[in-house]
Image (cartoon, rainbow, N blue to C red):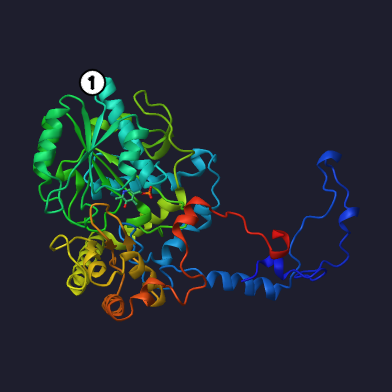
Amino acid sequence: MKLIFERSVPGRRAIEFLDAPSFADVPLDIPEAYVRKAPPELPEVSELEVVRHYTALSQRNFGVDTGFYPLGSCTMKYNPRILEVVASFEGFRDLHPNAPEELVQGALAVLAGLERNLREILGMDAVSLLPAAGSHGELLGLMLVRAYFAERGEQRDVVLVPDSAHGTNPASAAMAGFRAVTLPSNSRGRLDLEALRRALAEHEGRVAALMLTNPNTLGLFEDQILEIAERVHEAGALLYMDGANLNALLGVARPGDMGFDIVHVNVHKTLGTPHGGGGPGAGPVGVKGFLADYLPVPRVVRDGERFTLVEEAPKSVGRIRSFAGSFGVLVKAYAYILLHGPEGLRRVAERAVLNANYLFSLLKDTFAAPYPGPVMHEFVLSGKNVKAETGVRTLDVAKRLLDYGFHPPTIYFPLIVEEALMIEPTETEAKETLDAFAAALRAIVDEARRDPERVRSAPHTTPVGRLDDVKAARRPVLRYRTPERAQ
Ligand SMILES: *Cc1c(COP(=O)(O)O)cnc(C)c1O
């Protein structure tokens, strides 16, 4: 496909202005040194060519709007269009972030309402909407942990992280100045309680927090969570929940009731904002009351009939984000919650879990199932049986799925499962779609037996074929050059 610059023909125009002065004749009030000596190099194309070019580009995109996208841990679900409508109401969209408080009372009421609803959903006493992403929420959570122990005069520098955790967990721990210590999972895919006991004993008085994902990244509920919470608290440490994806829990179970002291949730997975494309997102953090004073500023505070943004908070970790957070995204999260109501949110979770279990039951005999179900909102299979029998790897299966019109699942994560396929169907998909996806995977495994090369050389129908992953990582070509300029 050509770049729009390569479609350029000198003198061709999309729009012409009658009697427009020529570039050179425009009087300028700009210092001579900064005035262009030549017109900018813009593509010269007709309006129709512009429309065709961008329409063709948009059709190269694969998204939830075009097909099934079961990318485990990422929750690529459909987000109702009405949320975009609400977020683009003039009263929200056109606000200036420095507008005086008395002119933005409605916007502050939205933030306060969202905080109140998240407190309820998370089972927490206070919420900050400021973090710009899940990983940013993790960093904030760990900054709160640090502030808490600093005030108590305790020197705790260890954060425990299970080996199934998202890579951001140990990274956030390190960024917040802690040392991440890995805990193994047991044969049931859950945190190994005995290993937790040993780690707490070995680092006695040094453990600041355990970061746990629940349901964990294997799609399994940490069913010993109450005992885990008890042991962590007995050791004087705090319990952090990575609640990036709350799809299995909404309206059913609350992190606060499980004993977690801090939790972050990605609104761009769970609450109405599409995930991907580089954002923007938001990763609100909820805490129990004893940590509320450390939350960042500004805080939305109700003062009688008025809302204000409070900047002064003596124990606060300070500012972590410009203005009041990713406002448009937060509007969508609030609208999503109000749109569904308590019953609707619960149905979201029930269907997410039902869809995952249905798809798991269709596929658990095609691939190896390292852990038995039932699963939560997602599940992990292993392609090691297919690899052993046919030499075809999970990567090849994923690439071949593209030819069948599906976005592949997450692969090779979590790291503890060999040849992993991590599948998250989400609640918004119909049974027919799940059936068709399972049929495609079975057909590919069948192909792997009959014609493995066909699978290994996939994809065959996409604009570009198999890329060299190693070369792409080691010698990336980040700049496109038109054929004539490349010489
Ligand atoms: C997505 C995810 C994160 C990170 O969220 P970002 O918004 O991408 O920073 C952290 N933990 C888990 C379990 C996740 O799925």
How would you rate the neighbour count of disc 1 (Cα within 10 Å): few for under 14, some for 14-19, many for 20 or more? some
Judge whether 152 appears above or below 70 on screen: above
Q: Residue at x 47, y 61 (%)?
A: 468
Inspect this view and state whether residue 31 appears. Answer: no
Q: Is residue 200 left or right of residue 90?
A: left
Secondary structure type for disc 1: loop
Inspect this view and state whether residue 389 appears. Answer: yes
Residue picked out by circle 1:
154
Ligand 1 has an atom within 8 Å of the beta carbon of the residue at disc 1: no
Q: Quadrant of residue 192?
A: top left
The one of 84 and 2 positioned closer to us in this rendering: 2
Quarter holding the N terminus is bottom right
Query: In the rendering, at what x and y percent does residue 476 appear?
Result: 53, 53
Query: In the rendering, at what x and y percent does residue 386 appear?
Result: 24, 70
Quarter holding the C terminus is bottom right
The one of 17 and 437 positioned closer to us in this rendering: 437
